[in-house]
């Protein structure tokens, strides 16, 4: 997915190289080993292929920062509700298993599709902030807000 310009348009603005993708895979494997969370692959069992990926990770990749939730999908899976479904599963993991007090999500200001997923998840727009060497729209969701929306979760 990282090689597709339409996937990376709002993430880095350019396709990833094979080397960048491999480095990211190694980083993810190390985080799973160290922290017990990072990026997940979303697998389409009917086609036996990757439909997308999502994460619970530290914002800005630093452990002293709050947890971030994020996702990206292959264009074949856009508009089917998969990002929202995955976001609920990942938020449940973060709040229930990791006891996160808050989850943040960041997006390119023009990425309206991600803004809609964040809104459906119950996140509130917090404002523009500097993360990942750029200005991004930041959304947040507290554990208390999550518990109200998903009482069976906690």
Image (tube, rainbow, N blue to C red):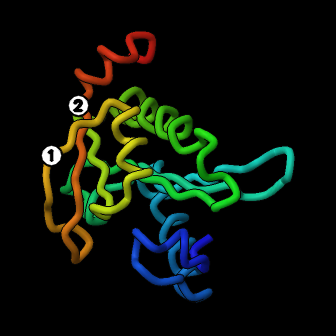
Q: Is residue 13 above or below residue 79?
A: below
Judging depth in this view, the residue of 117 and 30 nearest the camera is: 117
Q: Quadrant of the N terminus?
A: bottom right
The local secondary structure at tag 1 comes to strand
Mark 2 touching mark 1, by CB under 8 A? no
21 with respect to 138 (left or right) = right
The local secondary structure at tag 2 comes to strand
Outermost residue on the top side: it is 152
Q: Which one is closest to the eye, mark 2 or mark 1? A: 1
Residue 59, numbered circle: none
Residue 49 at what x, y percent from top left? Answer: 78, 58
Q: Earlier in the sequence, mark 2 or mark 1?
A: 1
Residue 21 at what x, y percent from top left? Answer: 57, 79
Mark 2 and mark 1: Cα distance apart in space: 12 Å
Quarter-of-image position of residue 60: bottom left
Judging depth in this view, the residue of 146 and 79 nearest the camera is: 79
Q: Which residue lies at the image location 20% right of the left edge and 55% below the top edge?
A: 65
Q: Is residue 126 above or below residue 27?
A: above
Q: Which residue is mark 2?
A: 142
Q: Which residue is mark 1?
A: 126
Quarter-of-image position of residue 59: bottom left
73 with respect to 136 (left or right) = right
Q: Which residue lies at the image location 46% right of the left edge and 49% below the top edge?
A: 37
Q: Which residue lies at the image location 53% right of the left edge and 83% below the top edge?
A: 16
Q: Which residue lies at the image location 41% right of the left edge and 35% below the top edge?
A: 91
68 with respect to 90 (left or right) = left
80 with respect to 118 (left or right) = right
Residue 57 at what x, y percent from top left? Answer: 37, 54
Please count the marks in the image. 2
Judging depth in this view, the residue of 107 and 59 nearest the camera is: 107
Q: Quadrant of the C terminus?
A: top left
């Amino acid at each position: 997915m990282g090689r597709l310009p339409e996937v990376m348009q709002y993430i880095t603005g350019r396709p990833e190289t094979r080397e960048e993708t491999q480095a990211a895979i190694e980083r993810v494997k190390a985080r799973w080993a160290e922290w017990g969370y990072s990026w997940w692959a979303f697998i389409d069992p009917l086609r036996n292929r990757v439909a997308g990926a999502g994460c619970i990770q530290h914002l800005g990749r630093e452990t002293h920062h709050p947890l971030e939730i994020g996702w990206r999908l292959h264009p074949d899976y856009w508009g089917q509700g998969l990002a929202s479904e995955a976001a609920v599963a990942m938020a449940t993991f973060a709040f229930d298993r990791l006891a996160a007090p808050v989850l943040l999500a960041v997006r390119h200001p023009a990425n309206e599709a991600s803004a809609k997923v964040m809104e459906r998840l119950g996140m509130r727009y917090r404002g523009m902030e500097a993360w990942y060497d750029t200005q991004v729209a930041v959304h947040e969701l507290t554990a208390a807000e999550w518990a109200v929306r998903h009482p069976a979760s906690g």
